[in-house]
Image (spheres, helix red, strand yellow):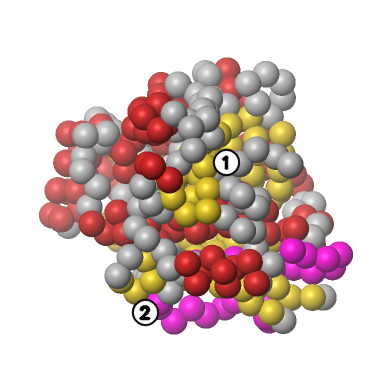
Amino acid sequence: MAASRLFLGNFDFEHRLADPHNTPSLKLKRLNAELATSWLAIANDGDLFLTPSPIEAAFFLKAVQMGLPHVIPAVNITDIPRGVECVPWGWSSEVRSFIKRVGGIGRGPSDAAVRFANSRATSERLERQWGVGLPGAQRLDSLEGLDEAIWAMVDMGRRWVVKAEFGMSARERIIGKGVPVESDKNWVRRRLASHRAVFFEPWVDRIEEAGIQMEVPVDGPPQLIGLTPMHVDVRGQYAGSWFAYSDARFQFDSDLWRGAVEIALRAATELQSHGYFGPLGIDAMLYRDEHGTPRIRPLQDINARWTMGRLSLGLRRFLEPGDEGYWQHSSTDDHVEGCPVEPERAVTTSPDRVGNERCLHVSRMIIHAK
C-alpha cells in the first residue's frame, strides 16, 4: 500500500505570487477552505487533506458510500503525522515553511523557478519568439502603451483584455471596449507600479479551450498526461472540465491541436531548463480570426502547479470503456447551463458546509455512459 500523502490546498497560489506579503482576504480564505475536498479526485484511501475550517464527518462518510476514497481531514497541525509526504497546489516559500513546521517531507522547485514558470512575462516571451501568440497581443510597460495598442487594432470598437503578471481563472484582468475609461487606467497604473508590466490582448471569437496536462520530471523529457476540454462561463471563468475513459473521445487529432501539444511540450522543456519540475497545465484556445479562419493559441496560460483539469483526470478511474464525464464547478447562486453530458449518475465532491457556513462553491462529478 502506498504511503499516505497530505494535500495542501493553497488555491490562492497566484495571489501569493503577485504579493507574498499580502494578507489573504476573507473571500480567498473561504475559497481555500471550500475547495479542499477537490483533492478527492486523485486521493487514495488513507490520504489526508488540510482543511482550514472543519468539514462535517457526514460528508466524508457519504463520499466513501459513493465510491470516493476514504480520506482523513486535518484541521490542526496536531492532526498531521510527522514524515508525511506533502503535496501542495503550488510550491511557495510559505508552503515550504509549513512543511518544515509540521515535520513533513516534500521536494519542490525553487521559488525563482516557480515564479519564472507562472509569469505571463515568460509566456509572452515564448509566444513572441516562437510566433504563436495572438496578433496584436503584447507586453505593456506604460499606460501610454495601452492607448497605442488599442489604436493599432483594425476595429477600434473591438473588445480587449489586459491581464496582470499573475492571475487565474479570469481573475486579475480587466475587459474593455474602445478607448479605456478612467477606472481601466487606474487598474493598469496600480499593476504597473507593482510589477512594471501588464499584458494586452485583443478579444477573439473563442471556439473551444482545453488544458494540456503534463508532468515535468527533474530529469528526462516532460510527459503528456492528457487533455481536458474546459467549460468556461459567461464571465470567462473556469466552470468545469470534461474527462473520458479515452482522450480519443475529444478528437484532438487535428493538425492545430497536435501542433498545440507539441508547442506545450516544448514550453515544458523550456521551464524545466530553468529549474521547474512537477505538475504543469497549459491552457490552449481554438478561436476564429477576423476572417473566420480557425486558429490556435497554444500558450494562452501557463500554470506551473496542479490544475482542476489535472485533478479531473483522476476521476477517470470511475469510468468504464466508452464512458465520459464532467466535473462541474459553480457557485450555488449561479444557474449553470450547458452541461456537456446528460447525467446518468452524479456524485457530489464538495460538502454542503465548511465550518459554520454554507458553501458558496459546489463541485460535482457527472458520469454518462455512452
On the image, the x and y values in percent for residue 182 come to: 13, 54
Label the magenta part by its dominant secondary structure: loop
Amino acid type for the residue under numbered disc 2: Asp
Please state the extent of the stretch shown in magenta in the rendering.
Answer: 318-343
Which of the pair 218/181 is nearer the observer?
A: 218
On the image, the x and y values in percent for residue 262 come to: 70, 36
Residue at label 2? Answer: 333
Quadrant location of the C terminus? Answer: bottom right
Q: In this rendering, is residue 271 above or below 350?
A: above
Residue drawn at the location 75% of the way across and 58% of the way down: 317
Quadrant location of the N terminus? Answer: top right
Residue 332 falls left or right of residue 144: right
Residue at label 1? Answer: 5
The dot on residue 105 is none
**Going from the N terminus, do you reach mark 1 or mark 2 first?**
1
Residue drawn at the location 61% of the way across and 41% of the way down: 4
The verdict on residue 359 being magenta is no
